[in-house]
Image (cartoon, rainbow, N blue to C red):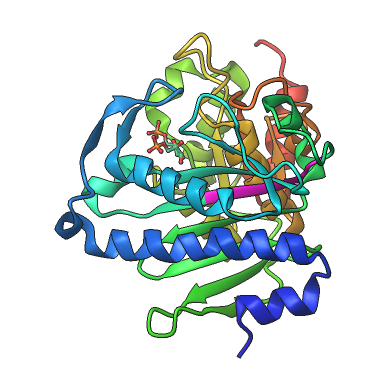
Amino acid sequence: MTTLTSYLDQHSTNTELNDVITTVTNVGKTISQLLRKGALADILGEAGNQNVQGEEQKKLDVLANDLLLDALAENTHCAGVASEELDNATPANADGSLLVLFDPLDGSSNIDINMAVGTIFSILPYQRQGQTSENSDFLQAGNQQLAAGYLLYGTSTILALTITENVVMFSLDPDTGDYVLIEDNVQIDADTSEYAINSSNYRYWRAPMQQYIDELIAGEAGVRGRDFNTRWVAAMVGDVHRILCRGGLFTYPFDTKYAHKAGKLRLMYEANPMSLLIERAGGGATDAVNRILDIEPTDIHQRVPVVLGSKNEVDYVKNLHVNYSEK
Ligand code: AFP
């Protein structure tokens, strides 16, 4: 049996990175236990305030955020933390070599209905050791990530992680508290007939995305020549996990629903970590045209349209956008 600890020892000589991953995943055990308690732990419902995104915070949003912040503040290798729930990055240990970014509880609108939620994390190098970290230190392209992963609090708690060229998965054994290796090289089929999108935003999409979805809905009778199926978890972690398990396409495209948002998803702690996982599993990840991991960030909370999953389908979306001409 391979545990997370033995996997890290065998596959990563960066002991500082291993230690920070261990800190994050240990907090994941606590969050998993709290979610199991649910209503019995008085952690459901609204926290009564909004985050920097202008979104109503759930009690567990705040709790998960604070648990991660407190644990990472104690980790000497962590120089700073950026969170979906905090306006600005939080300095930690100036001598640390790593920066940690996270969405502490992705899909929190699912909490009160007992549906899947998760924690998404990204780890970047810290280039100014000895100095107090600032927001600008986090503004690195996703191709600079040293590690990325998520915890999916579903029927079981799953850790997906990439620190090498592979994507691996662990399942949390609630009896022992160990993360046990269950997949050592996740690979995504290049083709798929399953897609995930919130179709209620159709009228806000750009014409190429409307055409793309129209083609999927037309199915066998249309240009694609086969029927498609949809799934929508309303938690990116759940949709991405399904794609890593059986292929598929996930998109939260550019929409004009809110003028100041490129789409809904955040680049630094949602799109970048998920894109690294998807690409290393053989998939693709773009903003419909450009590779997400090459985007040079300008703000730690900036949003980005996302199209990710089975490579040939992501490429199809790109070609459709690049070659689109008004009819
Ligand atoms: P919440 O964390 O506010 O529930 O948002 C989750 C999310 O950022 C992402 O995980 C989902 O894929 C997407 O939003 C769902 O958005 P819609 O609620 O518009 O479908």
Residue 83 place in picture, x, y as percent:
53, 37
Residue 90 magenta: no
Residue 106 left/right relative to 167 = left
Q: Residue at x 62, y 22 (%)?
A: 208
Q: Residue at x 43, y 66 (%)?
A: 29
Quadrant of the picture in which ligand 1 is shown: top left
Q: Is residue 53 visible?
A: yes
Q: Nearer the viewer, residue 137 or 163?
A: 137
Q: Nearer the viewer, residue 184 or 120?
A: 120
Does residue 262 lie above or below 86 as drawn?
Answer: above
Residue 125 magenta: yes
Tell which residue pokes out farthest to the bottom in this image: 1
Q: Which quadrant does the N terminus fall into?
A: bottom right
Does residue 44 lie above or below 49 as drawn?
Answer: below
Does residue 5 lie above or below 128 as drawn?
Answer: below
Q: Residue at x 61, y 54 (%)?
A: 192
Residue 37 place in picture, x, y as percent:
23, 63
Query: Which region is colored magenta?
Result: 120-126
Q: Is residue 188 visible?
A: no
